[in-house]
Image (cartoon, rainbow, N blue to C red):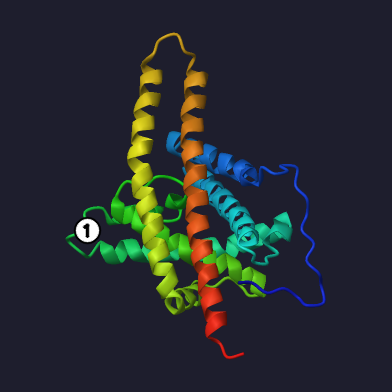
Amino acid sequence: MTSVAAARPLVFPSVSFGPFRLLEAVPWLMLASSMRFLAYGNALLAGPALVVANVALLLAFVIVVWRMVLISDGRSELGLLGFSQQVSMARRVLPQVLLLLIAASLVLGLVPAVAEPAQLMFGFDGIAFDQATHLGRLWSAFVAALVLLMVLQVDEAMKPSLLTAARQFAARARWLVPAVLLVAGLSMLLHPLQGWGRGLVRLVWLQEGIPTPVKSGIYFCFVFLFATARLWLTVAVLVLALRQSYRAQAESEPA
């Protein structure tokens, strides 16, 4: 799935999470969640907060991708990137994704049958956080696949390119299209569960005697836990599908 320099052996760092490696993305997801809360609660800080939230979400995405590549017997150096390298990657990936979101929203805005084209602007955010519509959930699954392909280009010593990712998606559509549909389906299944949980949290908010900070903390944990589940499910499905496409390609090549 990925390539590394032949002269340099792979040495993966040990992490303090031990066997609980699913938790490595937790700090970045917590930051992304808290920045979203800040953005929705403070109009003056909304812009900077959303920028930080998107960067944090991308870094969480990269960590989960790295772990899933290793779990699926692939090779990757994404976990060896320093913080400055990660931020540099984010500066290359996120502007291209933003342009894609804007273009998609504008194009669908011309289609009368689409009621809320602006929802497509949340395509990247929807990789971990719930979308408002099924179209948005499908779009987020597709955006996640493109971001995955862009991130993995870093392992190939390439500059992340949305155009290259789109070409790779088309070349591996046989495996990635079903994966995108599955991710969208899982997100649709999580939506009513999250709505049910949101109702319980709302009941807590209506209870008197519970301090507001405690209520806010409960709601934050609720959103964060669903974001973690959605991110891992999304990456797991897409990485495994992509891995299968590489195996099929290797089997079809002459010995």
Seen as rendered, the residue at the extreme bottom is: 254
Viewer-side residue, 83 vs 178: 178
Residue 65 appears at what percent x and percent y?
Answer: 59, 58
- Density class for disc 1 (Cα within 10 Å; few <14, some 14-19, many ≥20) is few
Q: Is residue 243 visible?
A: yes
Residue 113 appears at what percent x and percent y?
Answer: 17, 60
* Amino acid marked by disc 1: Val
Residue matched to label 1: 114
Look at 33% across and 54% down and name the residue there: 136
Viewer-side residue, 138 vs 85: 138
Seen as rendered, the residue at the extreme left is: 112
Residue 5 shown left or right of residue 124 in the figure: right
Residue 163 appears at what percent x and percent y?
Answer: 48, 76
Look at 57% across and 39% down and name the residue there: 30
Residue 201 appears at what percent x and percent y?
Answer: 40, 25
Residue 158 shown left or right of residue 141 in the figure: right
